Amino acid sequence: MQGVEFIDYYPGVIGEVTCLHAVYYAENWGFDLSFEAQVGRELAEFMARLDPDRDFFLAARDQDGLVGAVAMDGTSEEGVRLRWFIVRPDQHGSGLGRRLLERALDFVRAAGHERVFLWTFEGLDAARKLYDQAGFTVAEEHLVEQWGDSIKEQKLVLELQAPRSD
């Protein structure tokens, strides 16, 4: 991870995060245009309304561009939603994913949020290992037809202790 810079925003980051997701999931899972369109639309909407007291976004870059990203969307009544967590394939196993997730969870705790959830799907084993190590548990799973494929969607939840008010 030498030469990796962590930054909350830079011009072009929305497109780069969308591209990284679109290419990775098309090549590895066969996802279609509807996936890319959803990622781009929802990420752009999130970035336009990002509230630094409630939400979190972090990108990681090296000399070749974006190498990873993660966001925490605090607008849901269910808790903070972990979104757009991705690491460029050549960085898998480098510890970058763990660092991004740790920074995001540090924000959530510091902001006083009590619950984190995310939607993922069966088969993303490296990410799932990170989620399990962080304490997430499966709350729901079901088969869905979306993005041009059939997947077993999973909702993972992490319950955090409420901050103490001594």
Image (spheres, rainbow, N blue to C red):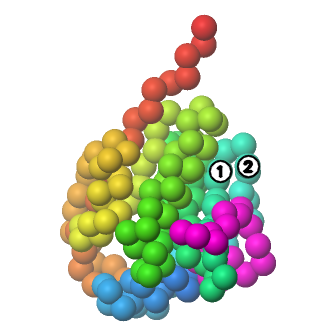
Magenta stretch in the rendered image: 1-17
> The C terminus appears in which quarter of the rendering?
top right
In the rendered image, residue 124 lying in the magenta stretch gets the answer: no
Which class describes the residues within 10 Å of circle 1: few (<14), some (14-19), or many (20+)? many
Where does the image place residue 151, in percent across and percent down from the top left? Answer: 25, 74
Where does the image place residue 133, in percent across and percent down from the top left? Answer: 32, 47
Mark-to-mark CA distance, 2 and 1: 5 Å
Q: Which residue is mark 2?
A: 52
Which one is in front, 5 or 19?
Answer: 5
Whether residue 119 sits left or right of residue 16 in the image: it is: left
* Vertical comparison of 21 with 130: above or below: below
* Vertical comparison of 26 with 145: above or below: below
Find numbered disc 1 in the image and state the secondary structure of the residue it sits on. Answer: loop
Where does the image place residue 164, in percent across and percent down from the top left? Answer: 55, 16
Query: CB of mark 2 within 8 Å of CB of mark 1?
Result: yes
Q: Residue at x 30, y 59 (%)?
A: 128
Q: Residue at x 24, y 71 (%)?
A: 123
Q: Residue furthest front?
A: 2
Which one is in front, 2 or 156?
Answer: 2
> The N terminus appears in which quarter of the rendering?
bottom right
Q: Amino acid at mark 2?
A: Pro
Q: Which residue is mark 1?
A: 55
* Vertical comparison of 127 with 137: above or below: below
Which one is in front, 156 or 98?
Answer: 98
